[in-house]
Amino acid sequence: MKNGCNRFDFIFEKKVVIDCEIVQGKISGEEGWISLGPWGGEDGVNWAYKADGPIMQISICYGLAIDSILIESKSCDGVIRSSEKFGGTGGYSTETVRPS
């Protein structure tokens, strides 16, 4: 971990690499939320996720584009909690990434 960030490297088929920096924040009050959107064309919606603790992994379902994302975090009592699935039902491949 460098500069307070966890680094996720997404490596898909055909050697496509997407780098993403996830900044760790103090989770209290309104802090700690991941909020993105709208995505999905004209029918896209905003979404938000607040981790109970450190993000343990992110699962990405994709085809020609990213179709959905699922986030798992570890609560302060050690329980792994999953977000709802953000996105649609498309995609034919899934990659799961963990902070390095």
Image (cartoon, helix red, strand yellow):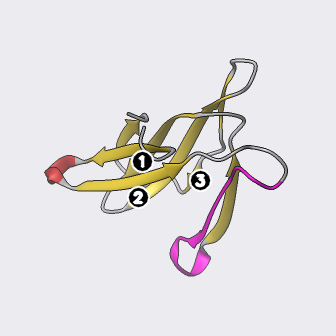
Where does residue 24 sit, x and y in percent of width and height?
Answer: 58, 45
Residue positioned most to the top: 78
Tell me what residue is drawn at x 57 percent, y 41 percent: 71
The magenta region covers 30-43
What distance separates the C-alpha of mark 2 from that of mark 1? 6 Å
What amino acid does circle 1 point to? Cys
Residue 47 image-quadrant placement = bottom right
Where does residue 79 sit, x and y in percent of width and height?
Answer: 69, 20
Q: Secondary structure at mark 2?
A: strand
Residue positioned most to the front: 3
Tell me what residue is drawn at x 74 percent, y 24 percent: 76
- Between 94 and 82, the residue placed more toward the observer is 82
Mark carried by residue 66: 2
Mark carried by residue 61: 1
What distance separates the C-alpha of mark 1 from that of mark 3? 10 Å
Left or right of 2 in this view: 48: right
Tell me what residue is drawn at x 38 percent, y 33 percent: 100
What distance separates the C-alpha of mark 3 from that of mark 2? 11 Å
Tell me what residue is drawn at x 50 percent, y 50 percent: 22
Where does residue 78 sit, x and y in percent of width and height?
Answer: 69, 18
